[in-house]
Image: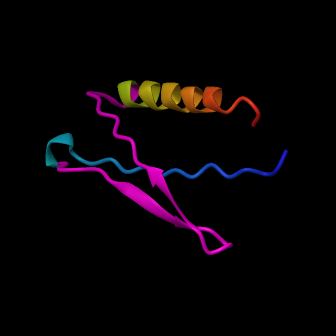
Amino acid sequence: MAKVALIYGVRLLPADELESVGEAPIALKNGRKASVTMHLIEGGSEEEIRRQLLQSLDAFFELYPEI
């Protein structure tokens, strides 16, 4: 299996100040472009956000069992 890279970004902002969340651009060495879909997790506490984030990461790796 080839070496893989997990790309992610994290930023906490007040939920009521968000208008939209878009994609993040990625430039590949071969000149091609890719993008990362940004995900929004809202919660009332740090524990709630952490739980949702960990569930999301688990689900991501389930989509790619070959990793």
Q: How many marks?
A: 0
Depth order, front residue of 18/24: 24
The answer to which quarter of the image holds residue 23 is bottom left
Which quarter of the rendered picture does the C terminus lie within?
A: top right
Residue situated in front as seen by the camera: 43 or 57:
57
Viewport quadrant of the N terminus: top right
Q: At 19% across and 48% down in the image, what residue appears?
A: 18
39 up-or-down from 2: above or below: above
- Residues rendered magenta in the picture: 18-47
Q: Is residue 35 magenta-colored?
A: yes
Please name the residue shown 46% across and 32% down the image: 53
Q: Position of residue 50 (x, y in %)?
A: 44, 30
- Image vertical order of residue 14 relative to residue 65, above or below: below
Is 48 on the left-hand or right-hand side of 6? left
Q: Residue furthest left?
A: 16
Question: What colour scheme governs how the chains and residues are painted in the rendered image of this protein?
Answer: rainbow
Measured as percent of width and height from the top left, residue 35 is found at: 48, 57
Q: Is residue 8 above or below residue 65?
A: below
Residue at coordinates 55% horizontally, 26% vertically from top-left?
A: 59
Q: Which residue is at the far right? A: 1
